[in-house]
Every structure is written in C-alpha cells, then in structure tokens.
Amino acid sequence: MKKAALLLLPLAMASCNYLGIPDGDVSGNILGTQPSGTIRMALRGVTLSGVQTPALDQGNLGTLNPEKRVYAISFPNTPEDGAYELFAYVDGETGTKLRYDSGEQKTGSRTFVYSKSGLNKKDGSDILNLKPGWTLMSGVTPGKNGTPFTSIDLNW
C-alpha cells in the first residue's frame, strides 16, 4: 500500500493545477499593514514599452493563507506573448466582485513578461532580447527567467 501511495504522489502533485491548487509559479508574502476586507490576487495584461498585452481574463486568485498573508499562484496554461502585472487588492463592495476595479486599494505590483520563442538575440540582455518563457522585470530591465519565482513580496 505504501508503494502505491508513493507511486501516485508525483501524479497528484502534477495535477495540482487542474484541481484548483496553485502550482507555485509565483509565491511570496504580502507585507505591510493589511487593510480590512477580502484580499484577492490579480494577474492582468499591461502595456510595456508600447506593446499591449492581449486581454487576460483576470482570475479570482485567493491568497494561500490570508492570515499569514502568504500567496502562491499559477500562470495561465496557454499565455500569450506580453507583459502581466501581479498584485493583491481588497475586493470592495462596489464594482465587479472577484475582479480588481479601479479605485480599489491594491499593493504595489510586480511585472512578468512572457515570450514563447524569445526575442532577437534571446540572451535576456534587455527588453528587446528576451529569453523564451517567463521573465521577472525590474522596471524595463529583465531579471530572473523561468519559473518558479519565489520570495516575490508585495507591499501595501
């Protein structure tokens, strides 16, 4: 019985994303004085260097442990090339529930860029030469490339 359980463990872990449990592409803490209300995570397409990311259906990404303000999210299974902004927000009583609406209080954000094939030299030297896959940005300068991204803290 123990052997069967051990053989099924990798399958169960691989299916986490399909069962609604985030696979931890990005994880970290939400720091600072947390406002009252329901805290949610948002990942949405943004404009970066004049390139508009295709619209991303903003998911209702709950924090992994709201009391300890720890989060882990999964990136979309089939992302389109472009920039994506990650932040936490207070889902208010006005506007659209389960979506960030302008005017709702939010943390600072982190920007990730996805490029399926990479760009130009593909060496990650700048925004015009991205490596394939996901890249964490620092302003318009590429940082770490490839998941998982850990210790990506957001601040109120």
Image (spheres, helix red, strand yellow):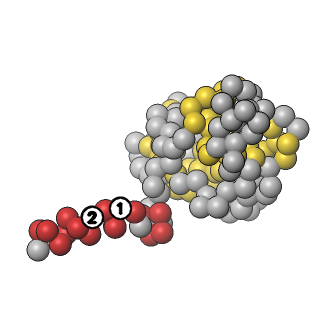
Q: Nearer the viewer, residue 152 or 90?
A: 152
Numbered disc 2: secondary structure: helix
Position in image of residue 128 (x %, y %): 78, 32
Q: Nearer the viewer, residue 28 or 138?
A: 138
Label 2 to label 1: alpha-carbon separation? 6 Å
Numbered disc 1: secondary structure: helix
Residue at 40% of width from left, 42% of height from top? 68
Is 143 left, or right, of 153 in this rendering?
A: right
Cβ–Cβ under 8 Å for marks 2 and 1:
yes
- The residue sitting at the left extreme is 1
Crowd rating for badge 2 (residues with CA inside 10 Å; few <14, some 14–19, many 20+): few
Crowd rating for badge 1 (residues with CA inside 10 Å; few <14, some 14–19, many 20+): few
Quarter location, residue 10: bottom left
Residue at 80% of width from left, 55% of height from top? 54
Position in image of residue 139 (x %, y %): 72, 27
Is 126 left, or right, of 12 in this rendering?
A: right
Tag of residue 13: 1
- The residue sitting at the right extreme is 50
Q: Amino acid at mark 1?
A: Met
Tag of residue 91: none
Q: Amino acid at mark 2?
A: Leu
Position in image of residue 71 (x %, y %): 47, 46
Residue at 65% of width from left, 38% of height from top? 131
**Residue 3 appears in the rendering:** yes
Quarter location, residue 92: bottom right
Residue at 47% of width from left, 57% of height from top? 22
Quadrant in which the N terminus appears: bottom left
Q: Which residue was labeled with disc 2?
A: 9
Is 109 left, or right, of 14 in this rendering?
A: right
Quadrant in which the C terminus appears: top right
Quarter location, residue 55: bottom right
Q: Nearer the viewer, residue 74 or 124?
A: 124
